[in-house]
Image: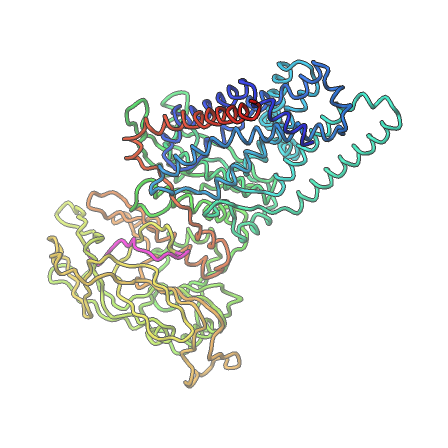
């Protein structure tokens, strides 16, 4: 076999056509990756080599048939195949020798593309900001695909004596196996489409091209190569089939070989593993997401409203959504179908406006982005949503979430990190799976139903929300978590015992609680004083590790506004009001990761105190420019009719929310227990539990329209200087917190995903664009020429006497 292998390598590299073929391949790839604007890495703006691995297969369709077209066809045309078969070589040695020779030449053709890798590495911002493990995995996929195309090309060469016919046949077969079968699958539906698409090379190459190694894909590629080589071998030994003993033996071997391949693929399909080689494991789904997908029992359709021409960042966003849904399909094959639509695409402007108006009327808020087209900037309206239909249910899911304080690319990157979480939560809601029960504690003058209608209407989609009282024993089996929202009257000792023992037995609680209260109806003129609230929970929180201080915090940097009615026309003026503030400084925690700003009203500082076995994590912080007003805190509208003095706001950053986790100690340890309680189940040291404390009882209170008293959606703040409504992420914080409290190992874990933003250095590209284009067009060709001259020189020295 080695003799055949070395002969084919030498014969190919000794001809000028070899360098022409490889040169054309490298030139084509170079133009596509670095010059043509539609596929250029430079225009894409991100440091990856996706264009090489997406366009490479189509260039391979011409390169590889050009390498293989003469390998057997020329032997048959010249009559040397019979001479070759008389040598002390088996037919399999001949086939494998030629195959591995052609495969080696394909690999050598790919080696010069490492110039592209070097260029992208140098152009990264910072230098080296490149997913090297993922690119290695992608190269593995491209080389494996090249192995299949090589087998196809060799088979085509074995079936004809004409090299041109061999080339054309190989190109057609490669194209059909790569894209044709997928196109056939699109013509049918149901299980048949799945089975047909599973035979497509592009279906199995897709994951490999992204650095995701699936054992099923490896099995498919290896099996396809072996199957095609068996056909090639069969064609070469066709002359022996006239002898019945040999024919019977060969039929038996082929049958056993095919059976082994079939069994091999069946086993691989049922027992597979996926190796995510990407540096940030972007294609690895969380166990909770996989379990959710396994529970789905009805067909699902996902409409992605991100079709058409998009800016590079949104192209990347769209690609990430598609890849995530493809990963969903891996664990629930045949259930999920998806397609892309463009709401802005219509035959005329009237139809387009109607489409956009319909979406907006149904709660879909568009995003305006600026794109460059034909050298000029234009505005585009984008709806970053998907519409999921599951059974008879349908819902729109907003995917573009995240902190808006960063650059547009950073915001999109945060949204990409959250795609799995948002899609999984949406599916869980539609399928009505794994619902938790949340108890809303009543009986202490908490926020009334009109003030939390926005919160309830949102949370009821995900949780079973029940109002309850602490007048009897409460078990974690009955309520997965409790919410105490702005109590203004005292908890009795027995109620505190019930609440304490709920926590001791592993129950989770969320406290939205304030230490002071101010009557805003008395805030005009000289104003009023904020006085302490007697909710009688200070000692309970203190025992658990938190001290709620009796003060108000003012934040001058992120202050809110308070509506004041003035004049005979009852004009509404939104007065600057530092008692209200937007908070956008969060901890790196699943509850708050990639969260947009939240809105606080009349909040206080908190301190942590010693509590053995309890871990305390601050979740939210004010800005550095704060002032603390101790009780009794003055609250007067006239004090803020003019801009406050910034020098007074130097209190520094304050934590306004904490997560407590661990084994809590009972408030009633070493104390006399209340009468009329169940003392048999009393625990002094608790089971593992979690508590979230926010020093703002109004955190879930929705604003009301001042004119008709109708409630706004939770998080919507209509009181801005310019009158514009702003949407804050209060409901997102509440959902994340409740999801974490009720199941910290559930879907909330997917919010931990970290995807590194890898932009190109724009300044460097702008000043050195021509250099990098020239390097990547000429560099691989220079390497090829140097290789040719060195090889020719060595060959000349070897054979010159």
Picture residue at 61% right of the left edge, 39% below the top = 217
Q: Position of residue 392 (x, y in %)?
A: 55, 41
Q: Nearer the viewer, residue 389 or 153?
A: 153
**x then y, percent, for residue 474:** 49, 71
Counting every numbered tag in the picture gives 0
Image position, residue 332 (x, y; %): 60, 44
Task: Judge from the rendering whether residue 446 lies leftward or rightward of residue 497; answer left or right.
Answer: left
Magenta residue check for 458: no
Question: Is the N terminus in the top left, top right, bottom left or bottom right quadrant?
Answer: top right
| The C terminus, quarter of image | top right
Residue drawn at the location 49% of the way across and 31% of the way down: 54
Q: Is residue 71 left or right of residue 300?
A: right
Q: Is residue 536 visible?
A: no
**Residue 495: which quarter of the image?**
bottom left
For image coordinates 71% across by 16% down, the residue present is: 76
Q: Quadrant of residue 151?
A: top right
Location of residue 85 (image quadrant): top right
Image position of 157 with respect to 697: above or below: above
- Can residue 7 be seen? yes
Q: Looking at this view, name the residue that lies furthest to the right.
A: 245
Which segment is the magenta one?
Answer: 578-591
């Amino acid at each position: 076999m080695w003799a055949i292998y070395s002969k084919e390598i030498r014969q190919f590299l000794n001809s000028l056509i070899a360098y022409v073929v490889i040169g054309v391949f490298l030139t084509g790839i170079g133009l596509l990756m670095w010059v043509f604007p539609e596929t250029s890495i430079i225009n894409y703006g991100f440091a990856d080599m996706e264009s090489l691995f997406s366009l490479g297969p189509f260039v391979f369709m011409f390169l590889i048939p050009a390498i293989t077209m003469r390998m057997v066809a020329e032997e048959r045309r010249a009559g040397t195949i019979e001479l070759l078969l008389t040598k002390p070589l088996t037919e399999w040695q001949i086939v494998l020798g030629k195959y591995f020779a052609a495969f080696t030449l394909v690999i050598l053709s790919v080696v010069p593309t490492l110039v592209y890798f070097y260029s992208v590495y140098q152009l990264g911002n910072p230098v080296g900001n490149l997913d090297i493990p993922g690119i290695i995995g992608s190269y593995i996929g491209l080389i494996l695909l090249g192995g299949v195309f090589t087998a196809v090309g060799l088979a085509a060469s074995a079936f004809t004596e004409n090299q041109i016919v061999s080339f054309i046949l190989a190109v057609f077969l490669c194209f059909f196996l790569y894209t044709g079968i997928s196109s056939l699958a699109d013509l049918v539906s149901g299980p048949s489409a799945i089975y047909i698409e599973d035979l497509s090379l592009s279906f199995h190459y897709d994951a490999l091209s992204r650095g995701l190694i699936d054992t099923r894909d490896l099995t498919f590629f290896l099996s396809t190569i072996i199957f095609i080589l068996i056909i090639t071998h069969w064609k070469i030994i066709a002359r022996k089939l006239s002898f019945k003993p040999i024919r019977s033996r060969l039929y038996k071997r082929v049958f056993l070989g095919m059976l082994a391949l079939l069994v091999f693929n069946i086993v691989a399909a049922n027992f597979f593993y996926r190796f995510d080689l990407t540096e940030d494991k972007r294609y690895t789904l969380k166990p909770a997401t996989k379990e959710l997908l396994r529970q789905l029992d009805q067909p699902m359709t996902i409409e992605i409203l991100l079709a058409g021409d998009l800016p590079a960042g949104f192209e990347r966003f769209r690609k990430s959504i598609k890849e995530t849904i493809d990963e969903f399909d891996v664990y629930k094959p045949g259930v999920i179908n998806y397609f892309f639509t463009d709401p802005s695409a219509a035959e005329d402007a009237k139809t387009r406006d109607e489409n956009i108006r319909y979406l907006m009327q149904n709660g879909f808020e568009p995003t305006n982005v600026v794109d460059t087209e034909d050298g000029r900037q234009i505005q585009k309206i984008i709806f970053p949503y998907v519409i999921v239909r599951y059974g008879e249910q349908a819902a729109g899911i907003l995917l573009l979430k995240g902190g808006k304080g960063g650059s547009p690319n950073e915001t999109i990157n945060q949204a990409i990190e959250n795609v799995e979480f948002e899609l999984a939560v949406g599916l869980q809601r539609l399928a009505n799976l794994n619902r938790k029960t949340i108890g809303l504690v009543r009986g202490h003058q908490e926020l009334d139903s009109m003030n939390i209608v926005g919160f309830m209407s949102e949370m009821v989609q995900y949780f079973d929300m029940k109002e309850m009282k602490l007048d009897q024993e409460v078990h974690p089996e009955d309520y997965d978590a409790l919410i105490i929202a702005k109590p203004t009257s005292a908890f009795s000792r027995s109620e505190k015992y019930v609440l304490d023992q709920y926590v001791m037995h592993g129950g989770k609680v969320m406290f939205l609680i304030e230490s002071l209260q101010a009557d805003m109806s008395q805030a005009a003129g000289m104003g009023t004083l904020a006085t302490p609230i007697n909710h009688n929970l200070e000692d309970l929180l203190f025992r658990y590790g938190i001290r709620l201080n009796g003060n108000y915090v003012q934040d001058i940097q992120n202050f809110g506004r308070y509506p004041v009615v003035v004049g005979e026309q009852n004009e509404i003026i939104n007065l600057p009001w530092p008692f209200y503030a937007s908070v956008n400084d969060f901890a790196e925690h699943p509850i708050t990761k990639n969260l947009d700003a939240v809105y606080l009203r009349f909040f206080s500082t908190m301190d942590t105190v010693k509590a053995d076995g309890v871990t305390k994590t601050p979740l939210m912080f004010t800005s550095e420019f704060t002032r603390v007003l101790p009780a009794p805190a003055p609250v007067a509208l006239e004090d803020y009719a003019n801009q406050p003095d910034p020098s007074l706001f130097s209190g520094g950053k304050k934590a306004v929310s904490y997560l407590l986790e661990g084994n809590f100690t009972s408030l009633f340890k070493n104390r006399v227990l209340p009468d009329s309680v169940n003392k048999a189940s009393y625990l002094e040291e608790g089971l593992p539990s979690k508590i979230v404390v926010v020093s703002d009882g109004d955190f879930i209170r929705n604003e009301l329209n001042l004119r008709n008293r109708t409630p706004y959606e939770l998080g919507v703040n209509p009181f801005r200087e310019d009158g514009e409504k702003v949407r804050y992420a209060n409901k997102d914080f509440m959902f994340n917190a409740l999801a974490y409290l009720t199941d910290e190992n559930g879907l909330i874990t997917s919010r931990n995903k970290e995807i590194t933003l890898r932009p190109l250095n724009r300044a460097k590209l702008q000043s050195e664009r021509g250099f990098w284009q020239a390097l990547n067009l000429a560099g691989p060709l220079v390497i090829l020429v140097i290789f040719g001259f060195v090889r020719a020189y060595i060959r000349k020295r070897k054979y010159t006497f």
